[in-house]
Amino acid sequence: MSLSRRTFVGSALAGAVGVGGLANAAQGEGAKADSATPGKTPHTRFAVNCEMWFRKLPFLDRIAASADLGFPAIEFWPHEGKDLPAIARLCAQRNIAVAQFTAWGFKPGLNETKNHDAFVKAIERGCEVAKQLNCPLMTVVAGDDVPGLTQEQMHQNTIEGLKRAAPIAEKHRVTLILEPMNIRVDHKGHCLYGSGPTLKICQAVNSPAVKINWDLYHMHITEGDLCGHLREGFAAGHIGYLQLADHPGRNEPGTGEIHYNRVLKEAWKLGYRGYVGLELNPKTTELAAAQACARADAWEVD
């Protein structure tokens, strides 16, 4: 443990106990969520987003701090510029998995055919990284609106690009998870939002290696009825990964309007046993956010 991480985590733990204790009392939950390792939850396996948690720490120390809180996995955005061998070593040492990372971001857009050669190369490289990190999932993004193209054309271009990359992912046993955004709050001008069109894209690609990064935060803002749409996504067989954040604020569960106890229980009942990415901004401290996530996992199995 580095001195910087020891100092930071110690301060976070000390500062969050009161917040977590008050929240527990207010919600009537047991003491389990108020422990020093709230990431060890009975049902949901959470993955800390290391781009949004522990931002004051060096990247490797963020992984270690996540493990200190008991979380079984992490996720991150682009792999470029990161010390991949060091990440792999640390994750092995701390017994923490890499749930997913981003192999293709917003720009250049997958929704333009001129970018498809570069997209295929990025997926080839991403599969090498996935093997190095023992990671089965890679997020891909469709892209922002392209002047002169209709939404239908952009979606069709996305389908064509994914069809080119799917055999590569299948060969390497990696799943590409396409993430729809929301255009009301965070990503105005993005070409893909909501479960309906994203399901249609996956159906058109028709590959077991192309599924959806079903970010519940984005889906809530775009279309609501989270449990109903989850059932549709599972029935279609296209949900590859879940992420969450509350709304408004994009903070941890309990800070907004989404009843995540109900939503996570629904995902469990539908058979989801993968990681759930915590792509959220801790509102006060990381410990308080982790305790809130643990409280969202408090429900009885039917």
Image: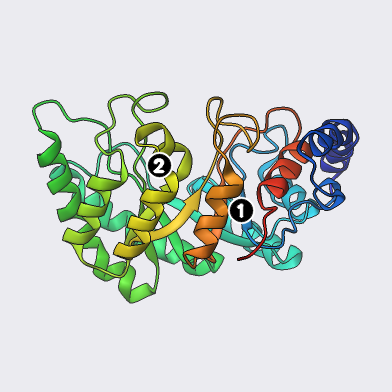
Query: Which of 244/52 is in front?
Result: 244
Q: Position of residue 281 (x, y in %)?
A: 61, 32
Residue 134 is situated, as x and y percent measured from the top left of the image, at 54, 69
Write the residue at 47% across / 38% down: 217
Q: Is residue 227 above or below residue 184?
A: below
Which amino acid type is shown beneath numbered disc 1? Ala
Of 58 and 251, nearer the camera is 251
Indicate the position of residue 77 as horizontal and vertical percent values. 49, 45
Give coordinates of residue 135: x percent, y percent.
51, 65
Q: Secondary structure at mark 2?
A: loop
For the residues labelled 1 and 2, the Cα–Cα distance comes to 24 Å
Of the numbered discs 1 and 2, the one sitting upstream in the chain is 1
**From the viewer's perspective, is 139 left or right of 160?**
right
Residue 125 in view (yes/no): no
> Which one is in front in this view, the residue at disc 1 or the one at disc 2?
2
User: In the rendered picture of this protein, how many numbered marks are placed on residues?
Assistant: 2
User: Which residue is depicted at the point 28% across and 38% down?
Assistant: 143
Amino acid carrying label 2: it is Asp
Residue that badge 1 annotates: 47
Question: From the viewer's perspective, is residue 252 above or below residue 148?
Answer: below
Quarter occupied by the C terminus: bottom right
Q: Quadrant of residue 285?
A: top right
| Camera-side residue of 15 and 132 | 15
Q: Which residue: 38% across, 57% down?
A: 231
Question: Circle 1: is it few (<14), some (14-19), or many (20+) Cα within 10 Å?
Answer: many
Report which residue position mark 2 lands on. Answer: 225
Q: Secondary structure at mark 1?
A: strand
Whether residue 43 is visible, yes or no, is: yes
| Left or right: 95 in relation to 234 | right
